[in-house]
Amino acid sequence: MAKVLPLALGPRKRQPAAGGNEADAGLVRRLQRGDEAALVQVMERYGPAILAYTYRIVGDRLLAEEILQDTMLKVWQQARLFRMDGHLKAWLFKVARNNAIDYKRRKRPVEEELGPTLPAPTQRPDREAERAWVAARIDAALTALPLVYREVVELRYYHQLDYQEIAEVLGIPLGTVKSRISYALKRLPRLLRDQGIDQYLLDP
């Protein structure tokens, strides 16, 4: 039976949706009042996801941690600008993305580091190594996508943002998000086959 792509990477932990989520709305109101404990809760709730997201952009753990700190500082400083009809999670990702892009722009030119050596596609791992093997192959397939398509897939399937939240993060129309994801879903099966796996599918 076909498997859904995110399951190959581990259980999907659905994080609470912001905006309409009362807990997030309460956090925003507390941030706007200058409640430092609310910032700590935001870090606990969304920090790991933001760190993973920025790491995938910059490829450097220490730099990703620095960007996370800068993101939280900016959120603290700009909390009063947040629109209560928006999505807190999307806002956090947007701030983090902008910070990461700024860091990359300032650091250029930077040589791309080679990733870990992967086994040949014909090599099948034992059961214990299969999870890591598949994850590495999926990552390689995603890397083969153009950035604009890879980004929407990662936000959707790695970080479980809905289409509207992705549109807010990237500053693009909702229809563009849908068309980019549709294009990526059509391309990925071939890219996955090129990596030696074809039983993992994406669930739109």
Image: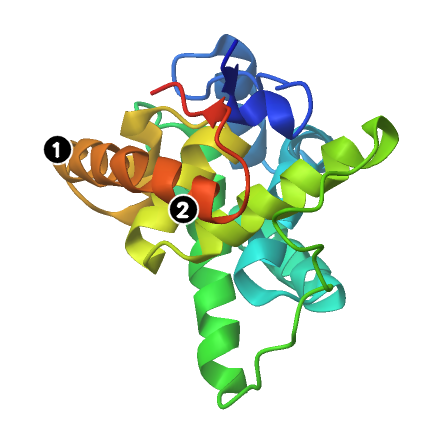
Residue 111 percent location from the top left of the image: 57, 86
Is 50 situated left or right of 97 in this image?
Answer: right
Could you tell me which secondary element the residue under label 1 belongs to? helix
User: Disc 2 on helix, strand or loop?
Assistant: helix
Specify whether 180 is left or right of 12: left
* Residue at 45% from the left image edge and 41% from the top image edge: 193
Q: How packed is label 1: few (under 14 Cα within 10 Å), some, or many (20 or more)?
A: few
Q: Residue 49: image x %, image y %?
A: 62, 38
Name the amino acid, label 2.
Leu
Give me the residue at 33% from left, 36% from top.
166
Q: Horizontally, is 145 left or right of 95 in the view?
A: left
Q: Quadrant of residue 68?
A: bottom right
Measured as percent of width and height from the top left, residue 108 is found at 49, 87
Please report the residue visible at 42 percent of the width from the left and 60 percent of the height from the top.
98
Name which of mark 2 and mark 1 comes first in the sequence. Answer: 1
Mark 2 or 1, which is nearer the eye? Answer: 2
Q: Position of residue 1 (x, y in %)?
A: 52, 9
For label 1, the residue is 175
Q: Which residue is mark 2?
A: 191
Say what amino acid the circle numbered 1 marks: Gly
Return the residue found at the far bottom: 109
Q: CA distance from mark 2 to mark 1?
A: 24 Å
